[in-house]
Amino acid sequence: MFKAVLDDVTPFRDALTAVSEFITEASFKAKKDGIYMTAVDPTMVVLVNLKFLATNFGKYEVDSEQEISVNMESLLSVLKRASSSDKVTLELDKDGKKLEITFVGKSTRRFVQPLINIEDSESPEMNLDFATVVDLQTSILEDGIGDASIVSDTLVLSADEKKFSMSSKGDLNEVQLDIEKGNKAILDLTSKGSSSSKFSLDYFKKIVKAGKLADVVKIEIGKDYPARLTFRQKDSLELSYVLAPRVED
């Protein structure tokens, strides 16, 4: 049995919208303390990890861990039909084969979607040791990505004990954003030496769409190493992305 009621659907819908930038079919696990999802995008470049805690729901009931596998586009097309004043109920049918979605507001509307089968829905665990961790205002990340997009299709993240930087270099132009430790836009910066890795900018353009979930993003990097970006609301939700570095030919 699984039943969850959202008094405000917006945070859940925004989180799933951000996930759908990379994941088209998702297998969610409804546990006692909330809904979890871990998946790798089809290109095997990005690992997406979502935690949406039970505290977000006005009512949350699950008798044992349930796996709920859905087509993301189909689910979001339904959730986008909900108004901000609607109470949204998500519930598995008695056979556990369909997801029932009910909106209660000025009227009562009910949608039923079949669950799908996803082969090998388990994603590999990744044990990563990052040299640099920076807690940065999300707006700064957005600025760096926007600046880089007019120069090249790559983005370099670098840092040392004193500074975090985002840069991009094209055939003719280049751009660099520097932010020193002590600047109010950096809430924390710790680094064991120097870190620098290059990434595809297209992936960052999709990742930063999760910025509406949190004002601060935790960025973890190393030297020629993956990056992990985490958007978090305390005691509510967490959405993280692990992105592989770009390897030059």
Image (cartoon, helix red, strand yellow):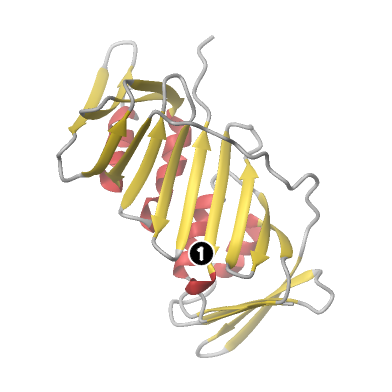
Residue at the (25%, 22%) spot, across then down: 175
Which percent across, then down, holds residue 238?
47, 55
Query: Quick check: 200 above or below 114?
Result: above
- Identify the image quadrant of the C terminus: top right
Q: Is residue 76 left or right of residue 160?
A: right
Q: In this view, does 139 lie to the left or right of 26?
A: left
Which percent across, then down, holds residue 145?
33, 35
As drawn, the residue found furthest toward the right would be: 95
Residue at the (26%, 42%) spot, across then down: 188
**Between 234 and 193, the one nearer to me in the picture:** 193
Question: How packed is label 1: few (under 14 Cα within 10 Å), some, or many (20 or more)?
Answer: some
Residue denoted by label 1: 13
- Identify the image quadrant of the N terminus: bottom right
Query: Quick check: 164 above or below 108?
Result: above
State the image quarter where residue 47 is shown. Answer: top right
Residue at the (45%, 19%) spot, across then down: 224
Q: Can residue 229 be seen in this view?
A: yes
As drawn, the residue found furthest toward the front would be: 192
In the structure shown, which secondary structural element does the residue marked by tag 1 occupy?
helix
> What amino acid is labelled 1 in the image?
Arg
Query: Quick check: 85 above or below 17?
Result: below
**Between 200 and 63, the one nearer to me in the picture:** 63
**Between 57 and 43, the one nearer to me in the picture:** 57
Q: In this view, does 175 lie to the left or right of 196?
A: left
Which percent across, then down, holds residue 80?
53, 67
